[in-house]
Image: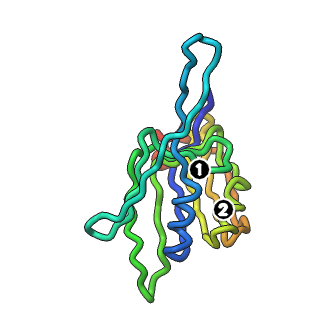
Amino acid sequence: MPNWAEGTLGIRGTKENILNFLKNELLGSAYPVFSNDGDGVEYKQRTTEHEVNNWGEHVFRCKGGFYINNTRRAFVEKDELIFDLCEDDDEIPQIEIEGFKQAWGVISDNYVDHSKKYDLDMKIFAFEQGMEFTQEIELCKGKIVKDVAEEHKDYFWTVPFAGLGG
């Protein structure tokens, strides 16, 4: 079983591009279906739902959480995500997805194609208490502009949210 780097995934771009990313790349988590004869197991993808609630917020639901498409074991461990994507002339729409986690550590290359395809900026903060490191990754329009992993000698004293990951 892996250790997990856990934290947040921030996404910035147009409302349309953010929604297209969420609709196309947040897949339902997989679950096992065992055969009756005991010969094997098949994995099926859960269905995701998207709706706009009475307050104009975009709500994404999936029992068991979400898998981020085309990543090596990156997930969002929440059954429901709610985003207010009001576009304002002075502000670029942005969201923060809590409950983000990736096995062992975040692989920045996993997000380059998403950032480029949807013309998005992405920022990931991850914490891994088992190996006592933090990661900060930033992508702009398909280019990695920051990819820093930092080990900490006194992890539980120097790192906020030191209980995340592991």
Q: Position of residue 131 (x, y in %)?
A: 63, 36
Kindly identify which residue carries mark 1. Answer: 68
Q: Which mark is residue 80?
A: none
- Outermost residue on the front side: it is 36
- Would residue 158 be seen by someone viewing this image from the given angle? no
Residue 112 lies in what quarter of the image? bottom right
Residue 32 lies in what quarter of the image? top right
Q: Position of residue 126 (x, y in %)?
A: 56, 49
Secondary structure of the residue carrying numbered label 2: helix
Between the C-alphas of marks 1 and 2, the distance is: 10 Å
- Callout 2: 10 Å neighbours few (<14), some, many (20+)? many
Tell me if residue 85 comes above or below residue 153 in the rendering: below
Residue type at the position of mark 1: Ile
- Callout 1: 10 Å neighbours few (<14), some, many (20+)? many
Q: Position of residue 72 (x, y in %)?
A: 68, 43
Q: Residue at x 58, y 42 (%)?
A: 5
156 or 148, which lies in front? 148
In the image, is 125 to the left or to the right of 97?
right
104 or 88, which lies in front? 88
Secondary structure of the residue carrying numbered label 1: strand
Tell me if residue 85 comes above or below residue 6 in the rendering: below
Residue 55 lies in what quarter of the image? bottom left
Mark 1 vs 2: CB contact within 8 A:
yes
The tag earlier along the polypeptide, 1 or 2, is 1
- Outermost residue on the left side: it is 54
Q: Residue at x 41, y 72 (%)?
A: 85
Residue type at the position of mark 2: His
Kindly identify which residue carries mark 2. Answer: 114
- Would residue 81 be seen by someone viewing this image from the given angle? yes
